[in-house]
Amino acid sequence: MEIKALIIDDEPLAQDVIKQYAQKLPDLTIAATCCEAICAHKILQEQEIDLLFLDINMPKLSGISFLRNLKNPPLVIFTTAYSEYALEGFELNAIDYLKKPFSFERFCKAYYRAEEQLLLRENATKANVADKKAGDFLFVKSNKKTYKVKYEDIFYIEGLGDYIKLHIKDNKLVTNLSMKKIIDLLPEDQFYRIHKSFIISLDKIDSVEGNMVSIKGNKLPIGNSFRQDFTEFINRFLAD
């Protein structure tokens, strides 16, 4: 499985060490780096990150304070030169605590702990998803109510940071789910992700033109990283 990581550290040298170590692990991808925790929040809203390499002692906002304020945080490996923060870090359910400077061997030990945890989560999610896909609907919570939503009534789904908006027949529902979680819950043969912020119902497509998909009068963008796969998918159904 591919693991996407974000480095949050105010020391360029520390960032470089983690990047060099990560290059030696084929399944670990460094998606981005930040010099302070405040900038990292925007990246977490825009990208799906599995793992944080998080420094503790940083300007403006410490790594511990940053983590405490995150909703549904990724797995975390703390990286710091100060051992006195170790206990507090583990109380926040950190996977591991790397004291600088750390060796590649020690880095791997922390990474494999995270990988094992992510594999366990993935397997549990697959089992849960298999059960939930058995029907033709799902339940979502919105505005203190639980709604039954039929797959056939969903036009498209819009990502809103820690939330998503389901554009359905005669309604719109905002619920606290990530795009990654909702796409796992949906039938693969009925829905397609065309952008980091949009999942569409294939049955509801009116037209595709350039890098836009038209659904129910709304023009939705096709993201650069999704365009080739989506184009190849559409071409499979073109009439000769």
Image: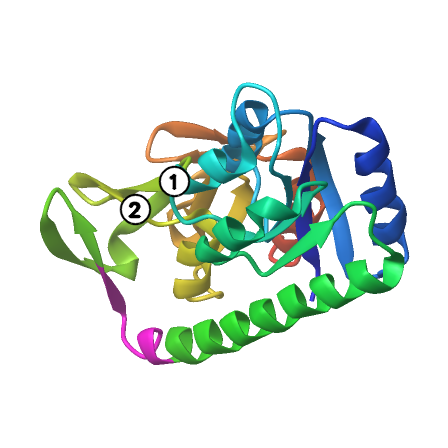
Residue 85's x, y, as percent? 57, 45
Q: In the rendered image of this protein, does residue 114 appear above or below residue 194?
A: below
Q: Is residue 17 above or below residue 43?
A: below
Amino acid type indicated by mark 1: Asp
> Which portion, as a residue range, is magenta?
131-139
Q: Nearer the viewer, residue 25 or 174?
A: 25
Which one is nearer the viewer's eye here, 6 or 127? 6
Residue 212 sits in quarter: top right
Q: Residue at x 90, y 57 (%)?
A: 24
Which residue is disc 1 drawn over? 162
x, y percentage for residue 177? Answer: 35, 50
Q: Nearer the viewer, residue 50 or 81?
A: 81
**Label 2 crowding class (10 Å Cα cut-off): few <14, some 14-19, many 20+?**
some
Q: Residue furthest front?
A: 84
Dividing the picture into quadrants, the one containing residue 152 is bottom left
Residue at horizontal 84 percent and vertical 60 percent from the top: 25
| Residue 151 percent coordinates (x, y) | 29, 60
Q: Which is nearer the N-term, disc 1 or disc 2?
A: 1
Query: What secondary structure is found at the residue carrying circle 1?
Result: loop
Q: Are marks 1 and 2 in contact (CB under 8 Å)?
A: yes
Q: Which residue is mark 2?
A: 176
